[in-house]
Image (tube, rainbow, N blue to C red):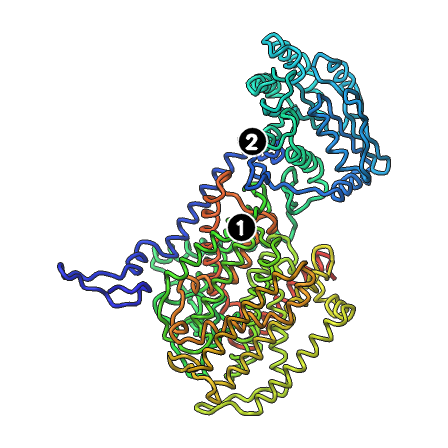
């Protein structure tokens, strides 16, 4: 029979005698990672052309998209077409007014129309007022609200019909030297009601609008002017005197306004009608907009007016794109020069071959020594050859960052092509998140949106299960699998915006802590086995962690702390390396011998000292800030606004996670050395009643933590207890996953594949899967969220896999095995960073 993993021998067809490939291997002949990347490249080119065409059609104007189209998501959550709507609180709204007033400009809004426009005027005043405003009981009159501190003036002119003083008002505005910043007009229901829906009234309406169009156009060229199309009505709820107002009549009046005003500088406000249409059921009298519609209409106006002033990350509608810096230009110039150089070399080689001239260019084939491999980062050398099992003291640990063992160093042409492909990839990053070429939408959470993709991913992971030759606890395939499914869960969590649900948020915190736990476990196991701890090892690890992140900091103009997980892992690995490198150092065990008892003593002493150091830093936030705001490393720990609190929050939340992993590694080595557990075969770790008790205790650990998350009432309280109890669910999972030999000797190749590129997945999601610095979702296929998620995910995974491959090529070049050359390269890198810091005013 054909095995699902694709590792079985070739099958022989019983009837024809022909040799057949296993299903997976046969599929690999037609579809593999290389073919997938070619398809992804073609998909990206097509979408660039498609969105470029849309920009030609509508000019890429996100303001027009905000006003023209959109849809409701789930329970009445409005999503504008192709851009992100920031939800303005009262504080945000007044902050916007204050900022405009600081620029010595007036905040002047003018509403002209009937009772529907008055309803919007009142909602905006409530949004901006410090105290609850009082409106007069007499409705049919002009209204005004003023706030001298904010230089704010909001006016409403009661003009229910175009024939009622509207020409005089527009004539006065046209002659005015100082116009309001925003004018909103709209009317029709009064004319329909008074004329009982006659066709003569419609013609008069159109004629009046044509007479006013010239004035409207001139005013619209000097200020932002909106014509609000008429919302539909609920005819059954209308009062008897309003029954002439029908949706058919309103459509005719809207068509008249569109016919007259199209082509002028007056913007037609379509989306208000769509918002009202989606919330008709909640209208109180059938005529006026519901509370939901008024709320979103107000938010649309605030986004239209304020987004370009305050630049909220989650408000891309009507927001200018970020300016390009000199550092970004220089970085792209260097990357783009690599394929040019490679083309020149190729032409030279071709000419030499054509003219039979010997080519003196040689390639370096020196072999590279590789300390170990970690499933978070390492790529497959072969998809069908699992790593060989090694004895306990020489087993490859699941460290976090070491490169895959290579047989030869890449040639110059391979390096140049890799950098050239990297330039194209970084260009795609820039297009996605630093330009307005591709659309962006707000995240939307619902229980179905979150749990359905998780169930689908789990089903795929369980389907692609294989046997593994490894039997050790937390063997490489298992840690690859663990990191893979954790990363997929985190991706779904980020895309759906599930952080607002406290139990989900707390479980995701456990997954992030588990990464650091495995970092401590893997690296300590590596050092415990007696492998080298020199500068080469440290530079290789740090290069693998930070290469992509540093490059993104340069090309995307973001601080190092923006990619919070990478600084966190880098810092804790540095602490671990220093802790184990300082004397007394662990004594490497001789081949065939057990670890020295003194190694346990030294390890305990180092653990106690590290725990004390962490606790002292935590207890004194002032001392913590003094250490991390020191130059020259201050720039590594502060955000764009020179704030250290984000680093403080991340640091203290997982301050013991890596230490837990180191302690667990020490206990595991002790238990195996003294035969407390036996994982050298595929049998259960423990037998009989103790195994049942331990397994039940592990299940209780997981259940108890889940129960704890339901008792937490707010995030600060949950975060405060998290560092002390996070080891409980992690330990419970390890026991449940490894106790039974049958489970320990099988793994999910689907999850393991993602586990090998999980660092790239974690970092790249910020710009080419999510959008607006993770606050939104990238949109390649507008208005079709499921199809868009599939398309962006496919391209995203292919990019991550290619970036991982490029990093594998560059690692031996950037970090040679020779300590002197590695130190030289590190010094050059630090010097370049310091030069960039001086240019950006960090020092």
Q: Mark 1 or 2, which is nearer the eye?
A: 1
Question: In screen coordinates, is 156 left or right of 70?
Answer: right
Q: Nearer the viewer, residue 142 or 25?
A: 142
Question: In screen coordinates, is 34 left or right of 186?
Answer: left
Name the residue located 43 percent from the left edge and 63 percent from the top edge. Answer: 753
Which residue position holds label 1?
447
The correct choice, above or below, for 761 with respect to 661 in the image is: above
Give the CA separation, mark 1 to mark 2.
Answer: 35 Å
Report crowding for label 2: few under 14, some 14 to 19, many 20 or more residues within 10 A (C-alpha): few
Report crowding for label 1: few under 14, some 14 to 19, many 20 or more residues within 10 A (C-alpha): few
Let me know if residue 602 appears in the view.
yes
Name the residue located 62 percent from the left edge and 53 percent from the top edge. Answer: 500
User: If the image is split into quadrants, where does the N terminus sit?
Assistant: bottom left
The correct choice, above or below, for 74 with respect to 26 in the image is: above
Q: Nearer the viewer, residue 621 or 746?
A: 746
Which residue position holds label 2?
58
Q: Nearer the viewer, residue 574 or 416?
A: 574
> SS at mark 2?
helix
Percent across and percent down for residue 388 are 38, 76
């Amino acid at each position: 029979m054909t095995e699902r993993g694709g590792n079985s021998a070739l099958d022989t067809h019983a009837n024809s005698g022909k040799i057949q490939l296993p299903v997976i291997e046969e599929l690999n002949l037609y579809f593999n990672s290389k073919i997938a990347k070619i398809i992804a490249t073609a998909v990206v080119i097509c979408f660039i052309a498609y969105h470029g065409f849309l920009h030609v059609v509508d000019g890429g104007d996100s303001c027009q998209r905000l006003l023209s189209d959109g849809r409701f998501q789930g329970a009445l959550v409005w999503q504008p077409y192709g851009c992100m709507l920031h939800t303005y609180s009262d504080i945000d709204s007044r902050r916007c007014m204050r900022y405009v007033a600081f620029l010595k400009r007036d905040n002047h809004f003018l509403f002209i129309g009937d009772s529907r426009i008055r309803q919007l005027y009142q909602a905006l005043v409530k949004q901006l007022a410090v105290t609850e405003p009082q409106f007069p009981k007499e409705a049919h009159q002009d209204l005004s609200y003023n706030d001298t501190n904010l230089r704010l003036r909001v006016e409403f002119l009661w003009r229910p019909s175009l024939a009622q003083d509207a020409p005089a008002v527009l004539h006065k505005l046209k002659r005015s030297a100082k116009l309001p910043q925003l004018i909103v007009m709209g009317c029709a229901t009064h004319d329909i009601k008074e004329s009982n829906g006659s066709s003569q009234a419609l013609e008069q309406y159109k004629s009046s609008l044509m007479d006013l169009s010239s004035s409207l156009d001139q005013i619209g060229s000097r200020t932002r002017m909106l014509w609000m199309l008429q919302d539909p009505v609920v005819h059954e709820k209308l009062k008897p005197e309003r029954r002439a107002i029908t949706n058919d009549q309103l459509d005719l009046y809207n068509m008249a306004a569109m016919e007259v005003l199209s082509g002028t500088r007056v913007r037609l406000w379509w989306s208000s009608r769509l918002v009202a249409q989606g919330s008709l059921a909640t209208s109180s009298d059938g005529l006026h907009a519901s509370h939901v519609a008024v709320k979103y209409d107000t938010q649309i106006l605030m986004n239209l007016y304020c987004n370009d002033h305050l630049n909220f990350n989650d408000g891309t509608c009507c927001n200018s794109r970020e300016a390009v810096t000199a550092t970004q230009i220089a970085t792209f110039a260097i990357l783009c020069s690599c394929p040019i150089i490679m083309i020149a070399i190729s032409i030279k080689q071709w000419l030499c071959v054509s003219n039979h001239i010997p080519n003196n260019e040689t390639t370096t084939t020196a072999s590279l020594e590789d300390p170990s491999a970690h499933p978070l980062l390492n790529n497959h050398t072969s998809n069908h050859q699992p790593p060989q099992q090694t004895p306990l003291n020489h087993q490859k640990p699941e460290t976090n960052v070491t490169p895959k063992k290579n047989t030869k160093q890449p040639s110059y042409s391979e390096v140049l092509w890799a950098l050239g492909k990297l330039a194209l990839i970084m260009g795609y990053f820039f297009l996605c998140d630093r330009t307005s070429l591709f659309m962006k939408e707000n995240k939307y959470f619902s229980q179905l949106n979150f749990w359905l993709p998780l169930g689908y991913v789990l089903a795929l992971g369980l389907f692609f299960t294989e046997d593994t030759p490894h039997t050790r606890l937390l063997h490489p395939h298992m840690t690859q699998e663990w990191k893979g499914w954790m990363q997929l869960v985190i991706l779904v969590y980020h895309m759906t915006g599930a952080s607002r649900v406290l139990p989900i948020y707390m479980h995701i915190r456990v997954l992030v802590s588990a990464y650091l736990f495995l970092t401590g476990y893997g690296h300590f196991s590596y050092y415990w086995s007696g492998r080298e701890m020199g500068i080469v090892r440290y530079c290789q690890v740090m290069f693998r962690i930070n290469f992509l992140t540093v490059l993104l900091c340069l090309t995307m103009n973001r601080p190092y702390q923006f990619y919070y997980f990478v600084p966190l892992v880098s810092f804790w690995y540095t602490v671990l390396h220093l802790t184990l490198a300082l004397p007394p150092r662990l004594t490497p065990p001789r081949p065939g011998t057990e670890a020295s008892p003194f190694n346990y003593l030294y390890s305990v002493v180092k653990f106690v000292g590290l725990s004390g150091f962490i606790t002292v830093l935590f207890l004194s936030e002032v001392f913590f800030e003094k250490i991390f705001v020191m130059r020259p490393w201050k720039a590594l720990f502060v955000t764009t606004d020179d704030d250290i609190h984000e680093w403080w929050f991340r640091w203290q939340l997982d301050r013991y996670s890596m230490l837990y992993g180191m302690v667990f590694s020490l206990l595991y080595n002790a238990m195996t050395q003294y035969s407390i557990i036996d994982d050298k075969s595929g049998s259960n770790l423990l037998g009989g009643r103790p195994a049942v008790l331990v397994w039940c205790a592990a299940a209780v650990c997981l259940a108890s933590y889940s129960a704890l998350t339901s008792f937490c009432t707010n995030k600060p309280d949950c975060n405060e207890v998290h560092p002390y109890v996070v080891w409980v669910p992690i330990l419970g999972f390890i026991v449940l996953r490894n106790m039974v030999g049958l489970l320990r000797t099988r793994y999910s190749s689907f999850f393991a594949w993602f586990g090998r590129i999980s660092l790239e997945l974690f970092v790249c999601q910020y710009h080419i899967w999510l959008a607006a610095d993770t606050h939104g979702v990238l949109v390649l296929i507008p208005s079709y969220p499921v199809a868009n998620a599939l398309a962006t995910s496919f391209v995203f995974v292919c990019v991550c896999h290619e970036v991982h491959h490029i990093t594998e090529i560059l690692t031996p070049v950037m970090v040679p095995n020779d300590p002197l050359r590695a130190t030289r390269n590190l010094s050059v890198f630090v010097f370049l960073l310091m030069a960039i810091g001086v240019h950006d005013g960090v020092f």
